[in-house]
Structures are given as structure tokens and as C-alpha cells.
Image: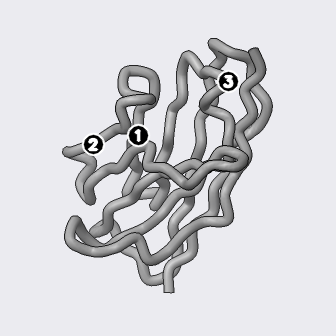
């Protein structure tokens, strides 16, 4: 079993920055991939960013590319999402998700943290 706990959400104004954290515990080791997803009210959940097990490869949705940065600290079993130049359309519940590798599905999800960006 793997547990994921997100933190760092809150209220922000357009142009502000927030940093989300996802603490990973349980059976997880450093050999996992972690992704961030978000869901806006009335919309489907969408991919935001992902990072490989060694942090050497990252991938972003076009909507956040250049503004968001995903990183990880394997010693702390924590993954971060630095969000800069926030826009109102970034508003939503942000979830981190865990998978064992690139061919695996995201089997474990956190409870989500709310991010609200006002104009």
C-alpha cells in the first residue's frame, strides 16, 4: 500500500506562485513515477506534470509548460510542484498520483489540495 498526502494549496492572485508538496509513504521506494493532475469544477481531471524515478525526465501539459516545475526529493520521499505566474484557469483540486513505472497505471492517489486563483 502507498499513501500520498498533498499540501500547499490555497488562495492566490493571478501572477502569484504556490508550491505544492506530495509526501509519499508506505511500500513506496524511490523507484516510482509521480504525476500531478488537477480537476476544475465541472470539468474532467486533467494531467499537469510527471517526473521519472530519478528525476531525470519531466513532462508537462502545454497549459502549464514554462510556468510549473515538478521536482522530487527521494531522500524525503516528496515530490513538489512549483507553480509560477498562476492564472485563474489554474484553479482546481490538485492531486498527486503514483505509479511504479512508465508502463503502469496510476494506482494510488492523494486526497487532493485546493488551489484557487483570483484575477
Label 1 or label 2, whichever comes before in sequence order: 2
Give coordinates of residue 8: x percent, y percent: 68, 42
* C-alpha span from label 1 to label 2: 7 Å
Mark 1 residue element:
strand
> Which residue is under mark 2?
58
The one nearer the camera, 63 or 13, is 63
Q: Quadrant of residue 71?
A: top left
Residue 83's tag is none
Name which residue lies at 56% across and 75% down: 3
Which residue is labeled 3 in the image? Answer: 88
Label 2 and label 3: CA atoms lie apart by: 24 Å
- The local secondary structure at tag 2 comes to strand
For the point 20% across and 45% down, which residue is it?
56
Q: Nearer the viewer, residue 86 or 23?
A: 86
Name the residue rendered at 62%, 21% in the picture: 87
Alpha-carbon span between mark 3 and mark 1 = 20 Å
- Name the residue carrying label 1: 70
The spot of residue 94 in percent (x, y) is 61, 49
- Quarter of the rendering occupied by the C terminus: top right
The answer to whether mark 1 and mark 2 are in CB contact below 8 A is yes
Position of 102 with respect to 42 (left or right) is left
Amino acid at each position: 500500500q502507498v499513501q500520498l498526502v498533498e499540501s500547499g494549496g490555497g488562495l492566490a492572485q493571478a501572477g502569484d506562485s504556490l508550491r505544492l508538496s506530495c509526501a509519499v509513504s508506505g511500500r513506496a521506494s524511490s523507484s516510482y513515477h509521480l504525476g500531478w493532475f488537477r480537476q476544475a469544477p465541472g470539468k474532467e481531471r486533467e494531467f499537469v506534470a510527471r517526473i521519472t524515478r530519478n528525476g531525470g525526465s519531466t513532462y508537462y501539459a502545454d497549459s502549464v509548460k514554462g510556468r510549473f516545475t515538478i521536482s522530487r526529493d527521494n531522500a524525503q520521499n516528496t515530490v513538489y510542484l512549483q507553480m509560477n505566474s498562476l492564472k485563474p484557469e489554474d484553479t482546481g483540486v490538485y492531486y498527486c498520483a503514483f505509479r511504479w513505472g512508465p508502463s503502469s497505471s496510476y494506482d494510488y492517489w492523494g486526497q487532493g489540495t485546493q488551489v484557487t486563483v483570483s484575477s
